[in-house]
Amino acid sequence: MKKKVVCMLLAATMVAGTLAGCGDKTGGDKPADKQGDTSAPSDVSADEGKVINIYSFNDEVRNRIQLVYPEIQETSKDGTVSTLKDGTEIHWIINPNQDGVYQDKLDEALMAQADASADDKVDIFAAETDYVVKYTDADSDVAMPLTDLGINPDSDLADQFDFTKTVACDANGVQRATSWQACPGVLVYRRDIAKDVFGTDDPEKIAEKTKDWDTMKAAAEELKGKGYYTFSCYTDTFRTYGNSIAEPWVAPGTTTVKVDQKLMDWVKDSKEWKDAGYFDPAVKGQWNADWFNAMGSKSKVFAFLFPAWGIDTQVKPNWDGEDGSWAVTSAPLAYNWGGTFLVAANGTDNPQHVKDILLAMTANTDNLVKISKETSDFTNGKTAMADAAKDDSYASDFLGGQNPYTYFTPSADTIKMAPLSAYDQGCVELIQNAFQDYLEGKVDFDKAKSNFETAIKERYPEITEVQWPE
């Protein structure tokens, strides 16, 4: 295993194959309890380890597991250790996603997995959609097939959205990860600005203004006429284009990055919108102070494109006005942004605990409902989310009593995931960085392309070529 891990995770010479539909193709152990019946943990073998190491890139996984896993008795004040009722400890190892730090730390631990002591072995790790296929590739030999844990994807995970199961499979259709989330995107907008410009803040009427990009452009001109910006910046729209690419960034078995025409459409349209004054010129990219400030009450920005997690973790914490000032409606194009997958690490000495945690988080309908109600996550259960779209108890005070699931759920049903590769996180980050300089007038178009080529080869030394659309 160690040789394969080194090849895949350190040199990255093995690339995940084309994703196939998932199915229980490996036989595996006996199936786990049926969906909806997984809240009670299985009997834990006496020879299970005493430390469960869970690697993640933020507190989200820890917070969700604490919310629904009944065996957690207490968590340390600093959030690094949780103690289970049987005395087992969960150690939370968290590193930031930015600049590949989390993956570097995780890769180092996985490379040492075979020789690590029991208390140091990786048991569960989180992976985002942008790079999960790097770890679920069968050749990398780091992610356990769920059937090896006794989880049957065909029965235990039958109610998950199909696109999330497809993402979690290797090229042979074997599911090696599972998620409690689906992340369909919507348009999140300021009610006060909508009333001032359009005379209404009704989501159905605003949807008529945002139903496609041509219509949205006309609305942007109306907003500009009243002194408002449609979006904070060009990176806000990136995911709607990036989710529509026709081919993976790096095809299986190659070392060539292919830039899809949709990405060049994003650059062209972003330049047009920026020159037209539809973006706030003070905001240069996401995840910075100016972007966060654009979500505040003094901002003139009308809307953001976010999935459910964006409302809960970005808009709400940065809003300094009253509840009820925001609403959601349909985005110009259906898209998915993000999603965190849980992976059981090959070599875990806690397979029963790992199974119980994965089932509690991703297969128990009651737990998915609890996560949705308490964190506003759009969770990975088709039945639960269809019910949520019709259930007034999901109304959000922050959204003025609106039930956002009436817009999330139909969007999820139409999502077709773009083909993924092991290089998506770096490609997505670096192409935005390179063309930000172009959009800000710091470099010309050809220099931006050249800068991307340099940056991607520095991040992934095995990449030999970048091909641009003609």
Image (cartoon, helix red, strand yellow):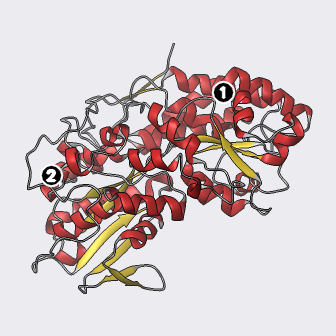
Say whether residue 388 is left or right of residue 395. Answer: left
Amino acid beneath label 2? Thr
The residue indicated by pointer 1 is: 211
Q: Position of residue 238 (x, y in %)?
A: 59, 35
Q: Position of residue 427 (x, y in %)?
A: 47, 38
Rendered image: mark on residue 147 = 2
Amino acid beneath label 1? Lys
Residue 231 visible here: yes
- The answer to which of marks 1 and 2 sits earlier in the sequence is 2
Say whether residue 237 is left or right of residue 192. Answer: left
User: Is 417 situated above or below 268?
Assistant: below
Q: Please name the residue shown 36% across and 31% down the image.
A: 250
Q: Position of residue 90 (x, y in %)?
A: 31, 77
The 10 Å Cα crowd at callout 2, few under 14, some 14 to 19, many 20 or more, is: many
Front residue of 346/314: it is 314
Residue 19: quarter of image: top left
1 or 2: mark nearer the eye: 1
Residue 451 visible here: no
Front residue of 250/158: it is 158
Q: Position of residue 205 (x, y in %)?
A: 74, 33
